Image (tube, rainbow, N blue to C red):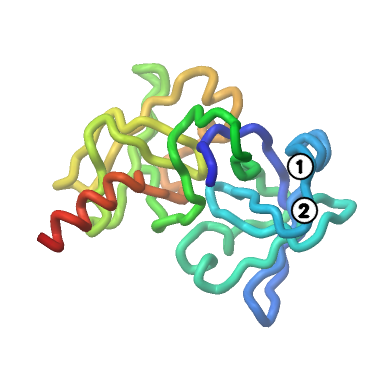
Amino acid sequence: MFTGLIRSLGTVAHSQPTAAGRQLVVGVDGGVSALGSIRLGDSIAVNGCCLTVVDVVADGLQFDVIPQTLGLTTLGSLRPGHRVHLERALLAGEPLGGHVVQGHVDGTGTVVDVCARDGCRVTVSVDPAQAQWLLDHGSIALDGVSLTLARVDRRAGSFAVALIPQTIRATLLGALRAGDVVNLEFDQLAKAVVALAARR
């Protein structure tokens, strides 16, 4: 489980197709120790996608990404030099400062507008089938970053989030531009309520 509070950034050092999907190596700003004590088998969210550490190498952390993950997320488009968000899995007893994020990306969205008039407001379009999970003032993880929905337009299949200065400083979201594709994980509670209502 994750919180959606980004503690570290990283840079893709290696991205290579394999028979099982893709091998990804990500360097961690400040070194691997910046994420804490990392061991083989630990879970790390890379741009919001929960991945398992399969090796700790000189260039950083190595992951194997399966085809299902590549099909649902932006990880297949990552190339050496791309910057990414990193978050180590929450440890028992640590504070949950963002919201409950599983690292199970539901799909991707496309940035349609970035407006700087009200701080920084980013509007993202989503698959119409997923718009039902958007709740006014609910939570969403955008490339792994815990955010509050500032505006929801289910009919248009879009939502907006407002980025505060601290979020812009600590993440890569301030560099988003129209046309960029981002990973989305919708709020688990919202999905559970919608599923329960559908069954009834």
Question: Residue sitting at 78 percent across and 52 percent down?
Answer: 39
Helix, strand, or loop for circle 2?
A: strand
Residue 54 occupies quadrant: bottom right
Question: Residue sitting at 66 percent across and 70 percent down?
Answer: 22
Expressed as whole percent of the image width and height from the top left, the position of residue 111 reads 39, 43
Expressed as whole percent of the image width and height from the top left, the position of residue 187 reads 35, 44
Which label belongs to residue 161?
Answer: none
79 lies above or below 154: below
Depth check, front residue: 9 or 3: 3
**Residue placed under numbered mark 2 in the picture:** 61
* 105 sits to left or right of 151: right
Expressed as whole percent of the image width and height from the top left, the position of residue 126 reads 31, 51
- Toward the right, the furthest residue is 58
- Toward the bottom, the furthest residue is 19
- Toward the left, the furthest residue is 200
Question: Residue sitting at 47 percent across and 56 percent down?
Answer: 104
Which label belongs to residue 28?
Answer: 1
* 164 sits to left or right of 5: left
* 16 sits to left or right of 165: right
The answer to whether mark 1 and mark 2 are in CB contact below 8 A is yes
Name the amino acid, label 2: Leu
Question: Residue sitting at 35 percent across and 36 percent down?
Answer: 139
- For label 1, count other residues whose C-alpha is less than 10 Å away and answer few (under 14), some (14-19) or many (20+): many
Question: Across the whole image, how many numbered discs are drawn on residues?
Answer: 2
Name the amino acid, label 1: Val
